[in-house]
Image (spheres, rainbow, N blue to C red):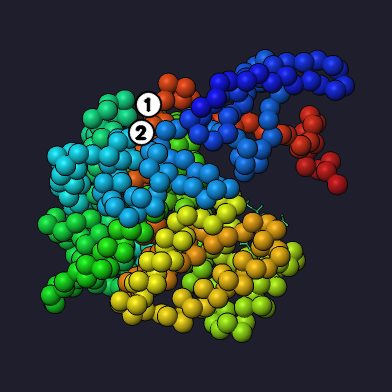
């Protein structure tokens, strides 16, 4: 950590000067504190997409996009992926430290205790058309949860905030499974609290009342790993949405629902579904050059899905772990090997292409995740829902941090107004 620095900003036309001060982080770039820029100088900053703006102070996740580093609470994600479990990572993200044995057992027990849904929530699904996109159902049902659990949504009460986080982390797989079963026209399968988080999810997805279903431990293990890698990613679009929605004091279920809606977009979590669509459309290695040419053509809206990232200008560390897992899962479970081989070849060719090299476009977390989901039998329309289940942990951690931040204020960005200046109303009969 370095100390703070002072910057002098000078208006070249008027010669007027003022000072800004930077604040250091524990790692990563300093931030220039501009909180008094408007009240002191009458100036706003302009940063569409927030590429250079730190919207908050956070202790949860750190990314070094140039070095390809991702750490949760200081722990490199590859160490967590190698040694931890999703539930342990959830504890770490929420509470800041790895749990001891007793803490982990208690947290695991608490999450298992909250898996069931109020029966009335389940009846919501009957109102959705059978072919509704599961993300639409999940966002809607999560948003409605405040109507059921309003007795524990006093956001000023730390115990209520805890119960909220435990509830939503425990229930989001149940909601996802209900959406999936509804789309199949199959009966809803109740959670089994003797199973761990991912085994229970697979049970609710694939069991049917008429047959015995045994969870494949390899599938549960692969899912657990994917969930660790998707659990948080600092101030991404959906997390910032959760923070912004929550900053008004809105109930946290609504804030999470807003995050789910933001995640659905193809530039964000919807990319895992879009990657599979793209690979299926490319279909064969011999068509790769045609699609690469399209991705590079400024007049064509086609982008190589699963490539590029706002922050990573190097290999996304999650993508390399997922690529390895993909190989393992496909070898042991059998899966769409040609699709994986096509993805590998596409990556190889793109990474040698001048356009992708120059723009530092590397595979991101979602380039390979869809192939694993497909091998586990999860349909494409559920891919982003899987992402949402994992990211719910990150959203909860950020929402809790935001609510207790002494510097926290309602999120309210300003703008550069370029519309009409003042003008008088013209009666309709006098308009041309
Ligand atoms: N294919 C082709 N060109 C691309 C791609 C791509 N996937 N990604 C970026 N570029 C080009 C852009 O056209 C732009 O070119 P230009 O400078 O000549 O105008 C340049 O690279 C920079 O791209 P931006 O869109 O300005 O970068 P930004 O940081 O705003 O966008 C994003 C990042 C949205 C992830 C982008 O790379 C993209 O659309 N990728 C495909 C979708 C995707 O995989 N999203 C998942 C992201 S990971 C996640 O959210 C879980």
User: Residue, x 27% and y 68% (percent of image)?
Assistant: 219
What residue is at 26 percent from the left and 49 percent from the top?
A: 87
Q: CA distance from mark 1 to mark 2?
A: 6 Å
Query: In the picture, residue 403 is in which quadrant?
Result: top left
- List x then y, in percent, for residue 24: 54, 26
Q: Residue, x 51% and y 55% (percent of image)? A: 316
Compared with 90, 287 (above or below) is below
Element type where label 2 sits in the image: helix
**Residue 418 falls left or right of residue 118:** right
Q: Position of residue 3 (x, y in %)?
A: 56, 21
Q: Residue at x 39, y 52 (%)?
A: 78
Crowding around mark 2 (Cα neighbors within 10 Å: few <14, some 14 to 19, many 20+) is: many
Viewer-nearest residue: 8 or 193 = 8
Looking at the image, residue 403 lies above or below residue 194: above
Residue 46 is labelled as none
Q: Is residue 242 visible?
A: no
The residue labelled by disc 1 is 404
* 307 or 77, nearer to the observer: 77
Give coordinates of residue 117: x percent, y percent.
21, 52
Q: Whereabouts is ligand 1, in terms of quadrant?
A: bottom right
- Categorize mark 1 by other alpha carbons within 10 Å: few (<14), some (14-19), many (20+): few
Say which residue label 2 marks.
400
In the image, is 122 to the left or to the right of 68?
A: left
Q: Position of residue 226 (x, y in %)?
A: 36, 59
124 left or right of 336 in image: left
Residue 71 lies, with reference to residue 405, above or below; the image says: below
Regarding mark 1 in the picture, which secondary structure is present there? loop
Pointers 1 and 2 in contact (CB under 8 A)?
yes
């Amino acid at each position: 950590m370095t100390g703070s620095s002072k910057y002098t900003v000078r208006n070249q036309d008027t010669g007027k000067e003022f000072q800004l001060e930077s604040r250091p982080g524990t790692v990563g770039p300093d931030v220039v504190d501009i909180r008094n820029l408007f009240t002191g100088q009458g100036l706003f900053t302009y940063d569409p997409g927030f590429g250079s703006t730190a919207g908050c102070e956070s202790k949860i996740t750190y990314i070094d996009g140039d070095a390809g580093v991702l750490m949760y609470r200081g722990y490199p994600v590859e160490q967590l992926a190698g040694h931890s479990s999703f539930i342990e990572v959830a504890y770490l993200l929420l509470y800041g430290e790895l749990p001891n044995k007793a803490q982990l057992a208690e947290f695991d027990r608490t999450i298992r205790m909250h898996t069931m849904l109020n029966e009335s929530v389940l009846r919501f699904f009957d109102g959705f058309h059978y072919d509704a996109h599961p993300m639409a159902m999940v966002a809607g049902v999560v948003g409605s949860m405040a109507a059921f659990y309003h007795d524990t949504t006093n956001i000023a009460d730390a115990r209520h905030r805890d119960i909220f986080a435990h509830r939503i982390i425990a229930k989001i797989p149940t909601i996802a499974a209900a959406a999936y079963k509804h789309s199949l026209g199959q009966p809803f399968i109740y959670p089994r609290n003797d199973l761990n988080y991912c085994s229970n999810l697979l049970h609710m997805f694939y069991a049917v009342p008429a047959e015995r279903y045994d969870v494949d431990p390899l599938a549960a293990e692969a899912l657990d790993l994917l969930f660790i890698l998707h659990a948080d990613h600092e101030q991404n679009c959906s997390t910032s949405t959760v923070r912004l929605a929550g900053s008004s004091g809105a109930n946290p279920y609504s804030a999470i629902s807003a995050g789910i809606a933001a995640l659905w977009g193809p530039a964000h979590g919807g990319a895992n579904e879009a990657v599979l669509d793209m690979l299926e459309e490319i279909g064969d290695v011999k068509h790769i050059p045609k699609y690469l040419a399209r991705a590079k053509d400024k007049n064509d809206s086609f982008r190589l899905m699963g490539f590029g990232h706002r922050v990573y200008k190097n290999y996304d560390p999650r993508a390399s772990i997922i690529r390895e897992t993909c190989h393992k899962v496909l070898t042991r479970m059998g899966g769409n090997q040609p699709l994986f081989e096509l993805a590998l070849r596409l990556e190889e060719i793109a990474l040698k292409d001048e356009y992708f090299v120059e723009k530092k476009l590397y595979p991101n977390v979602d380039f390979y995740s869809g192939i694993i989901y497909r091998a586990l039998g999860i349909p494409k329309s559920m891919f982003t829902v899987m992402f949402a289940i994992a990211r719910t942990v990150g959203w909860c951690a950020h929402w809790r941090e935001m609510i207790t931040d002494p510097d926290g204020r309602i999120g309210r960005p300003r703008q550069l107004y370029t519309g009409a200046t003042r003008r008088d109303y013209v009666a309709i009969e006098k308009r041309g």
